Amino acid sequence: MKILVTGGAGFIGSNFILYWIKNHPEDEIINFDALTYAGNLENLKSIEDNPNYKFVKGNIAQSNEVGPVMSGVDIVVHFAAESHVDRSILEPSSFILTNIVGTQVLLDAALKNNVKRFHHISTDEVFGELDLNDTNKFNERTNYNPRSPYSATKAGSDHLVRAYHFTYGLPITITNCSNNYGPYQFPEKFIPLAITNVIEGKKIPVYGDGLYIRDWLYVEDHVRAIEKVLERGKVGKTYLIGGMTELYPNIEIAKKIVRLLGKDESFIEFVKDRLGHDRRYDVDWSKTKEELGWEPQHNFDDWLKKTVEWYKENESWWKKVKSGEYKKYYKTQYEDGSR
Ligand SMILES: NC(=O)c1ccc[n+]([C@@H]2O[C@H](COP(=O)([O-])OP(=O)(O)OC[C@H]3O[C@@H](n4cnc5c(N)ncnc54)[C@H](O)[C@@H]3O)[C@@H](O)[C@H]2O)c1
């Protein structure tokens, strides 16, 4: 089977490729990625010489670049996106180009080449926010209510993917997952930002009152869920994927991280809140379990500890990433008050 992975040099995409090559060595993988600031081929160093793996640099929003790589592809697994909410607030236009236009360009090429499955990776953020004190969770019937430029563009892409199924009969599946954590996550996202800041002797910036709650999903659990959907998911369907964590507010996670690194709470500081910050996300993945026999296997505290260990052992990976453009972004976002 020939699989086209878009955004395979990013956090989740590279974890997916490493897992797939190990567990399905007979399949051929093409990693199509524009190598934006978030793409990093070092994540895939261990497999770069594998004859069943090939990297092609290209932009999903350019049909002349997408066309040639789609030829002969059986399955598309579409991760490529601008993925960081804070950056979407600073500069939404690249989110519209990549997340909406890019998805449409891929859908057209997939249709033209009769791919057998187009799997789209999306987020629980398309459903908006939940109140802190209610017990509702997002499920397959929750209405879309995106509240950031990022989630609005992901919602747009989900609608397009479904429209290509209903209008043109493209065989699609979609997964909407919660916040991932684990190895190779770019240190602009909360958990790797917090871990690497403390290792560098800097403080963890916690937005607002710190009482924001996410449903944390270990990246390997996510990757196994995608595998199940590709193997057993029903064409046209959407599956929700979440973790099995107790719902810790961000401030508690910051405290856990400083403790794991042997530091105290003076390493935590509250900073100006994110605009339009969603209070709480929580995913009901029981239907996915019922239909596909998938459930998360990694509990939060153990895997947070393992994730902290990974960042301790891979300083050279994240030190390279936390330079240049990253420093400029960090200053705008957390230090000079210009946002
Ligand atoms: N990280 C999370 O917690 C999370 C949660 C829910 C959903 N998602 C979704 O999962 C997917 C992967 O997320 P991630 O965290 O790995 O993202 P990431 O930012 O780490 O990686 C994105 C990858 O896409 C590539 N890319 C960006 N624009 C491109 C373009 N125009 N053409 C080709 N490649 C391009 C980048 O180079 C990078 O390698 C995204 O669709 C995201 O919306 C992520």
Image (cartoon, rainbow, N blue to C red):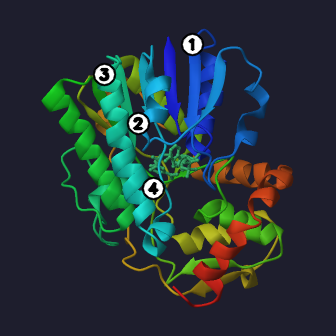
Q: Is residue 281 visible?
A: no
- Crowding around mark 2 (Cα neighbors within 10 Å: few <14, some 14 to 19, many 20+) is some
**Of callouts 4 and 3, the N-terminal one:** 3
Q: Does 100 sit left or right of 56 as displayed?
A: left
- Crowding around mark 1 (Cα neighbors within 10 Å: few <14, some 14 to 19, many 20+) is few
Q: Would you name the residue on which mark 1 appears? A: 27
**Of callouts 2 and 3, the N-terminal one:** 2
Residue drawn at point x = 38 percent, y = 30 percent:
119
Helix, strand or loop at label 2? It is helix
Q: Would you name the residue on which mark 4 appears? A: 215
Coordinates of residue 72 in the picture (x, y in percent): 45, 13
Which of the two residues, 298 or 179, is positioned nearer the viewer here? Answer: 179
Q: Would you name the residue on which mark 3 appears? A: 112
Helix, strand or loop at label 1? It is loop
- Mark 4 to mark 1 CA distance (whole Å): 32 Å
The amino acid sitting under disc 4 is Asp
Residue 320 against residue 113 in the figure, above or below:
below
Give the foreground label among 1 and 2: 2
Tag 4–tag 1 contact (CB < 8 Å): no
Q: Does 330 sit left or right of 309 as displayed?
A: left
